[in-house]
Amino acid sequence: MLCIHNGNIIDGKRKDFYQGDILIDKGKIVEISCNNLCYKAEKIIDAKNLWVMPGFIDVHCHLREPGFEYKEDIASGTRSAAAGGFTSIACMPNTKPTIDNAAMVNFIKMKAAQEGKVKVYPIGAITKGREGKELTEMKELLEAGVIALSDDGDPVSDSRIMRLALEYAGQWGLPLISHCEDKSLAKDGVMNEGIISTMLGLKGIPSAAEEIMVARDVILAGTTGAPLHIAHVSTKGSVEIIRKAKSMGIKVTCETAPHYFSADEKWVDGYDTNAKVNPPLRTEEDVEAIKKGLQDGTIDIIATDHAPHHRDEKEIEYPLAASGISGFETAFALCYTNLVTENVISLVELVNKMSTIPARIFKIHGGTLEVGKAADIAIVNLKEEYTIDVQGFYSKGKNNPFHGKKVKGKVVYTIVQGKVVYDDGKII
Amino acid sequence: MTLSKKDFLGLRNINCHEINEILETAKLMKYTLVKNNKKTSYLQGKTIVTLFYENSTRTRLSFELASKYMSASVANVSASSSSVAKGESLMDTGRTIERMGVDVIIIRHPLSGAAHLLARNVNVSVINAGDGMNEHPTQALLDMFTMCEKKGGIQGLQVAIIGDILHSRVARSNIWGLTTMGAKVRVAGPSTLMPPGLEDIGVQVFSNVEDAIRDADVVMALRLQKERQESSLLPSIREYSKVYGLNKERIALARKDVLIMHPGPINRGVELTSHIADCVNSTINEQVTNGVAVRMALLYLITRRRQNSNALYS
Ligand SMILES: [Zn+2]
Ligand SMILES: [Zn+2]
């Protein structure tokens, strides 16, 4: 038995925290108490002055396997996730080949079971080959174990196909995750369209490229009644459209990623390819709107959109560089530093957005600390201030614009199914 | 006299002292240019490489002659634009050239920020001869040099830039340089070719070309690429020249002694009429001569800087 002793516990159910011990046996939580439970355990984690919370659940990451193992694979990606306090992650299907059939889903699950450090939930494609033309065999994908469907990396540009996909997947309540981008408007843009793109002479992507698709998709979700989840919300306009849709009773949820409230378009100055991401980093005004959206609950959850790339794809001319940020290992610190210490949301609300609510939306086990449930736990030190160093990443992708930045909040332990997989800097 | 940075990438982050330094040095260089024997030994023993990923006869020739008039060895490397995305990376090419004992690399590239990428990855000096839509700083320097010559200074001048501001590196470099030197910059052009936020960097934006030209000391027309029509940014070249082209009537709104400039090559009858291109106020031919002088000055200053820093360590 393992006892997490004397930590500050946020259990994902109560609105406050309490001090106490958590006893774990055979992968499950067997007792939570305000009394000392150490005497029952062989192994003890002293969590004094640390915070114990349900392990984080990331519903949007790119593990790159199969097809792009030089960027990341399931082994390295799940280690990176564990180092970030994540115990369950859902990987996007834009691999080679695409995860668009049951066999591919089984391959991911098998690989993850063999080599993974955390629980991996595949997301299937909406259309075959993510080409936006023919629907995938969604029922079979569901039975194989996907938690959602998405053509992420690309939008479903054809509105009729999107509508049919919502109708069809909606029959089983299977959520569609929409990467909202009007390709004809985004065209060959490489950063947010605005004063900085003007100053740098880079082609801009207007906010409208995202917002038009958000509007289209919430309208389709409204008429079909199917569950829709909007990926990586980055603009003020998107937040407003989703807020309005929710007030109309449309079944829509959404996520943002840490970089959309921790950085803005100015970070691209100097042609920093690590700040190149899709959707692009937006303006200060958008950052404020994202924070407001997180605060009032319009933005339900935070997902990383962990998108590792090889250095050869980043150390090139800015317009040619790959888009994406390797985000697992900076997610919690950025959220804690920029949201909690800035009083945008409370620590309990942060845990909800990084664990409890994603579990609920996507029907993933976890998100709470309860007796009888799996012991998926993150333990963090909120006092520790440190400098982000990408060279220390477990991810193969060192592409992260926050390198060198001072942050607060460090993951010290990650426990998956009762097993310590990350212990103070080391993967076990 | 020297420059503070290893590289010369643009006018955005350069102060008025350094711009003055270059313009003053260019004055001296222009004397040697009009002499019978142009050759000086200022760059004796220096090696300069022009690395051009875009065709540009005039800019390359201008740099090459500037180097040769000062006795430097020059080698030209050409790579087609299509080889940008494939083949050897810019970083590897730059490092290879550096290893061959080069002092300065002059780069022209179709992508914004390419010169910055190269500069970060080599120890030799890098001069930006045009990167994508970003900057073409030596063009702006020669424009400013021409204004100085004709107007006695830049401070307080009203400069109107007309045309495709969105895609123009010449416009960007001129906006940075001119505002730093105390000129007032106005722009006019089709709104589909106007980038957002120019007001925030001190530029006056006009929707009407006549208003931009009125009482201007300098009117600069930008080259219009034919592709703009194909990508629907413009209904037609014909309509462009009708609404934004410089003609006698429009130029009459400017000050009598207005300078008419164009970075070349000109599309006669599109950006300006032949009458305007060839009139007494046009400095288009003189700009070409001044281009060599300005580039000589820049090369002189940038190589001197390296000599000084070497001296520190020997
Ligand atoms: Zn996406
Ligand atoms: Zn993604």
Image (cartoon, helix red, strand yellow):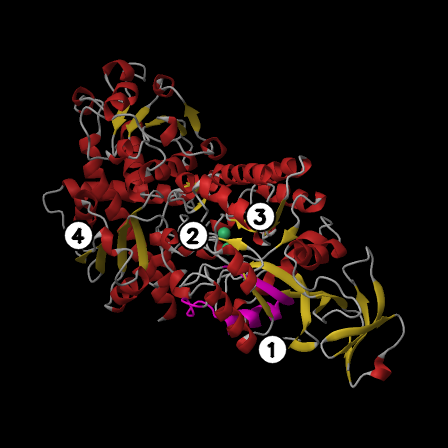
According to the picture, the residue beneath numbered tag 4 turns out to be: B40
Callout 3: few (<14), some (14-19), or many (20+) C-alpha neighbours within 10 Å?
some
Q: Is residue B223 left or right of residue B186?
A: left
Q: Which residues are magenta?
A: A66-92
According to the picture, the residue beneath numbered tag 2 turns out to be: A271
> Disc 4: which chain?
B
According to the picture, the residue beneath numbered tag 1 turns out to be: A427
Answer yes or no: do the residues labelled 3 and 1 have beta carbons within 8 Å? no
Q: Amino acid at mark 2?
A: Tyr
Look at the image and say whether residue A75 sits in the magenta stretch.
yes
Which numbered disc, 3 or 2, marks the residue closer to the eye? 3
Element type at mark 1: strand
Compare residues A403 and A49 and report the one nearer the observer.
A49
The structure residue drawn at horizontal position 41% and vertical position 60%, both measured from the top left corner, is A314
Q: Is residue B157 left or right of residue A78?
A: left
Give the quarter of the image for residue B147.
top left
Q: Residue furthest toward the left?
A: B36
> Disc 2: which chain?
A
Q: CA distance from mark 2 to mark 1?
A: 34 Å
